[in-house]
Amino acid sequence: MKKLFSVMLTFVLLFSLFAVGCGNTEEEVKGFSIYYLNIDKNKLAAMSYDLQSSGDDTQGAVHELLAALSGDSGDVEYKQSIPSGVTYSFSLEEDILTVDFDVAYQSLSVVEDVLCRAAIVKTVTQLDGVNGVLFLVDGASIADQSGNRIGVLTADDFVENPGEQINAIQEASLVLYFSNSTGDGLVKETRNVYYSSNISVEKLVMEQLIDGPTIENSLATIPSETKIINVSVVDGVCFVSLDEAFKNQNYEISENIVIYSIVNTLTELDSVSRVQISINGDTSGKYRDTFDMSTLYERNLDLLSIE
């Protein structure tokens, strides 16, 4: 209980940090913004920025922005978001930016870690060619306080809290569907997780599916290297966009098992009745040979295995 209380206090602190500081709200900052830290280094502060890179040079723009986040803002009210002594490399593939920090990043406090990542995501996703950021440390994925791998983050993952309500850690009981050991049926796994309220439960579910099963005689249906581009719900339809790695399937698992692993899991949520799956937002074509990506799929429990 002491450990859980400590974790909850940490999240209570963190969710109060994302209000934009120093008197500038996002609405007040015109044009492009750089998200620095405020003078007390406990909140993000948006500062107007004149981007020098050309509009069609996304790679150059990312380089410029990360350099700005690492350097002196020129104003004593704004502090660098990437701490001194932390170095990084980056790569841009499709619309996902991967930032790989050196091991010095591991010495950051929880608050510094979250604010650094929030500042980078909120800054670079203003570029047309960047929709999400994947963070690594020395080539390995960053994990949260519970040891769960953190996938691609978007600006929507960081909720700005004005202070009237402070969100704490939440608990959820998730029902996930994986493949049986022979790849021709679904098996159900119930998993209790603690998660922060700055992530939608739909995205949480997809991250748990990608992490794979924890029960015996079951197989993951989504390749572990798959990145989540976006997950959104409109009028009961959950739109799931995954990157190209989703196609790197284990062909010992039937294609309908893969599709309905995702569909059945998401439709366990009250907010979802149908699911559409796309690759980088593209719904043309088929998944393997049979399943149209443009189709809105409904729940199908006929595939549930006796096993």
Image: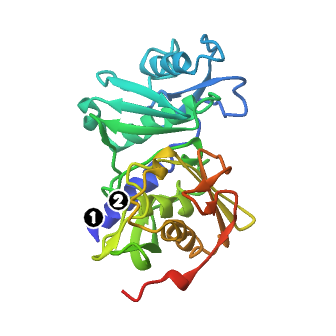
Q: Given the current orientation, which residue lies at the most extreme front position?
A: 289
Assign the C terminus to one quadrant of the image: bottom left
Query: Residue 41 at x, y = what percent?
Result: 44, 32
- Residue 173, visible in the rendered structure: no
One can see residue 186 in this view:
yes
**Depth check: 209 or 84 in front?**
209
Query: Residue sitting at 33 percent across and 30 percent down?
Result: 101
- The local secondary structure at tag 2 comes to helix
226 lies left or right of 262: left
Q: What residue type is labelled 2?
A: Val
Compute the Cα span from label 2 to label 1. Answer: 6 Å
Q: Is mark 1 on a helix, strand or loop?
A: helix
How crowded is the residue under tag 2: few (<14 C-alpha within 10 Å), some, or many (20+)?
some
Q: State the image quarter where residue 140 is shown.
A: top left
Name the quarter where the N terminus is drawn: bottom left
Asked whether 37 or 291 is in front, the reply is 291
Quadrant position of residue 208: bottom left
- Percent coordinates x, y for residue 189 in the rendering: 40, 77
Query: Residue 278, relative to residue 91: is it above or below?
Result: below
In the figure, 139 relative to 185: above or below?
Answer: above
For residue 120, side relative to residue 105 (left or right):
right
The structure's colour scheme is rainbow
Identify the residue under disc 2.
Answer: 7
**Pointers 2 and 1 in contact (CB under 8 A)?**
yes
Q: Which residue position is annotated with label 1?
A: 3
